[in-house]
């Protein structure tokens, strides 16, 4: 039996080779892997002894050779193949262990195109694909995490067809994601990220209990290990719907940097938000906006949940709490709530991946775009259009209202007072309906919106929304502007002695 080992990531390769050697495998290797194994006492054959041809062109050609690929690909149970291999002097290669040149690491550290090109693996993917194609006869290993499983399977006579089939699937996933990464990088560098094809790849983090409904299957897939590093299921199992809600809550809660932000979400929409001196105060104020909708909701906490906060949160049924982290005493308090799910990022504050692009499935395909970004300076640099200037607190309220509105389903209107959301209307077909629906909900909740700030993620097409806001006691408004009736909106704000700001940036979310 022969094993060919050629890896870029050499962690664990010496131990793996040693175990294969003890199991009777003859070891073949290339370049740096050969040197590492030889240095550590492994009896290893250099690749050019097999290929009968030296490595050439600065290592670009090493394994692209019929003695390598013939040894991998010929069918052991096919008499004609076996006879031809004997005639050509091709010996079988029964195990191939390959991981690929570090293309991702290279593009992260340099813009030097020559260096990037040299870190595109050719021989490696070819060997992986050859081995995967002939998985009936060949074991293909593409991850160091499988080394122990492979050794155990060979030693314990469990090297079954099903075992090799699973490794084959991993191998094709490995080369597919590698090629997709290269294609996406090249399109990003030369075609503004929008090439003839767009490849979206992710690695499975875990299976959800089911999809949106019990008859659907679901799973979470991640880019660049984001969830592996920053998502811990402390208590309970995350569902498909939980993850969508958590995502919406995290985006809003994290958009204010290190501030003590707390966001409550129900069915993907915010029903409470506040920033106060402490997280406890923030949660208490956020809950006031809509405690009815908050029942069974998802809470994102931009910080560490304390025992005191846990006691307060336990007063109602919450389905999920996602936080930077939890104090041990808080976890003990939450243990009493059997249906509550707790997720942590294991950090003092919330960490977001800040993906550069966004996409959405539509029937028959998907639409793809650059990710929207609500920049911190949009409110700071907003154009004052009214005669009245907003106060410092009103500007803070405008910032909160603006960011929440931009991260909530359109049409959306948000009302904020003293750094806490007091009303929100979202997902409406009419902007005036969104405004009035929010005010009606605030009235039902017994909340006083007078003196608050209001934001709309897109322009108000008519002055009627301004008139309604004035009637409710709104004192400051922020919106993108851009309507053909902007002058009427500005006139209305001056008539009602309200501050009005235009950001010139729209943030539709559909």
Image (cartoon, rainbow, N blue to C red):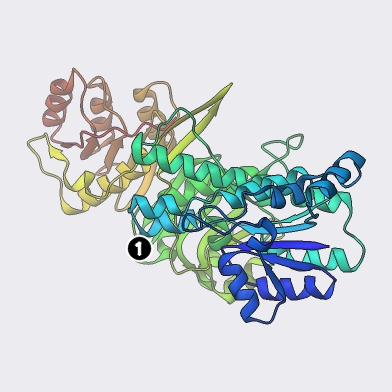
Q: Secondary structure at mark 1?
A: loop
Whether residue 505 sits left or right of residue 445 in the image: it is left
Q: Nearer the viewer, residue 475 or 352?
A: 352
Q: Name the residue located 66 percent from the left edge and 56 percent from the top edge.
A: 51
Q: Say above or below: 111 vs 304.
A: above
Q: Say above or below: 143 vs 132.
A: below
Q: Position of residue 339 (x, y in %)?
A: 70, 55
Q: Which residue is tagged 1?
A: 258
Q: Position of residue 73 (x, y in %)?
A: 77, 45
Callout 1 crowding tier (Cα within 10 Å): few <14, some 14–19, many ≥20: few
Q: Position of residue 307 (x, y in %)?
A: 54, 73
Q: How many marks?
A: 1
Q: Name the residue located 68 percent from the left edge and 82 percent from the top edge.
A: 41
Whether residue 428 sits left or right of residue 313 in the image: it is left
Whether residue 176 sits left or right of residue 510 in the image: it is right
Q: Name the residue located 86 percent from the left edge and 64 percent from the top edge.
A: 154
Q: Nearer the viewer, residue 88 or 170?
A: 88
Q: Quadrant of residue 379?
A: top left
Quadrant including the C terminus: top left
Quadrant including the N terminus: bottom right
Whether residue 274 sits left or right of residue 126 in the image: it is left
Q: Nearer the viewer, residue 306 or 113?
A: 113
Q: Quadrant of residue 427?
A: top left
Q: Say above or below: 495 vs 238.
A: above
Q: Position of residue 282 (x, y in %)?
A: 41, 59
Q: Name the residue located 74 percent from the left edge and 68 percent from the top edge.
A: 27
Q: Is residue 508 visible?
A: yes
- Report the residue that reaches farthest toward the left: 387
Q: Nearer the viewer, residue 192 or 309?
A: 192
Q: Is residue 142 visible?
A: no
């Amino acid at each position: 039996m022969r094993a060919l080992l050629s890896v870029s990531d050499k962690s664990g390769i010496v131990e793996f080779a040693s175990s294969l050697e003890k199991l009777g495998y003859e070891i073949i290797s290339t370049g740096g892997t050969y040197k590492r194994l030889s240095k550590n006492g492994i009896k290893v054959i250099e690749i050019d002894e097999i290929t009968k041809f030296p490595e050439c062109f600065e290592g670009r050609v090493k394994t692209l050779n019929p003695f390598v690929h013939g040894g991998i690909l010929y069918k052991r149970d096919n008499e004609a193949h076996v006879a031809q291999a004997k005639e050509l002097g091709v010996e079988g290669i029964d195990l191939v262990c390959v991981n690929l040149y570090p293309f991702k690491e290279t593009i992260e550290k340099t813009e030097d195109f020559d260096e990037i090109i040299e870190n595109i693996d050719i021989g490696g993917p070819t060997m992986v694909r050859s081995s995967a194609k002939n998985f009936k006869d060949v074991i293909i290993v593409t991850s160091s995490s499988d080394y122990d499983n492979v050794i155990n399977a060979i030693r314990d006579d469990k090297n079954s067809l099903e075992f090799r089939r699973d490794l084959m699937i991993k191998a094709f996933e490995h080369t597919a994601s590698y090629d997709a990464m290269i294609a996406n990088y090249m399109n990003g560098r030369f075609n503004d990220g929008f090439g003839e094809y767009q490849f979206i790849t992710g690695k499975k983090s875990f299976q959800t209990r089911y999809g949106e409904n019990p008859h659907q299957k679901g799973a979470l897939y991640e880019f660049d290990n984001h969830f592996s590093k920053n998502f811990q299921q402390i208590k309970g199992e995350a569902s498909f719907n939980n993850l969508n809600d958590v995502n919406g809550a995290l985006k809003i809660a994290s958009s204010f940097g290190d501030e003590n932000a707390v966001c409550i979400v129900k069915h993907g929409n915010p029903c409470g938000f506040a920033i106060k001196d402490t997280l406890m105060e923030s949660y208490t104020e956020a809950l006031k906006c809509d405690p009815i909708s908050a029942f069974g909701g998802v809470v994102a906490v931009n910080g560490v949940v304390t025992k005191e906060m846990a006691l307060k949160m336990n007063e109602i049924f919450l389905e999920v709490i996602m936080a930077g982290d939890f104090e041990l005493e808080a976890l003990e308090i939450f243990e009493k709530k059997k249906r509550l799910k707790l997720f942590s990022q294991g950090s003092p504050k919330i960490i977001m991946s800040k993906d550069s692009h966004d996409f959405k499935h539509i029937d028959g395909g998907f639409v793809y775009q650059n990710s929207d970004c609500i920049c911190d300076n949009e409110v700071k640099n907003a154009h004052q259009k009214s005669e009245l200037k907003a106060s410092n607190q009103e500007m803070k309220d405008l910032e909160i209202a603006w960011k929440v509105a931009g991260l909530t389903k359109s049409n959306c209107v948000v009302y904020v007072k003293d750094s806490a959301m007091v009303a929100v209307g979202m997902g409406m077909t009419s902007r005036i309906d969104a405004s009035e629906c929010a005010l009606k909900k605030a009235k039902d909740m017994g909340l006083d919106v007078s003196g608050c700030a209001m934001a709309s993620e897109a322009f108000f097409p008519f002055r009627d929304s301004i008139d309604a806001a004035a009637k409710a006691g709104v004192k400051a408004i922020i919106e993108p502007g851009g309507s053909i009736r902007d002058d009427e909106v500005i006139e209305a704000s001056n008539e009602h002695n309200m501050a009005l700001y235009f950001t010139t940036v729209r943030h539709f979310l559909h």
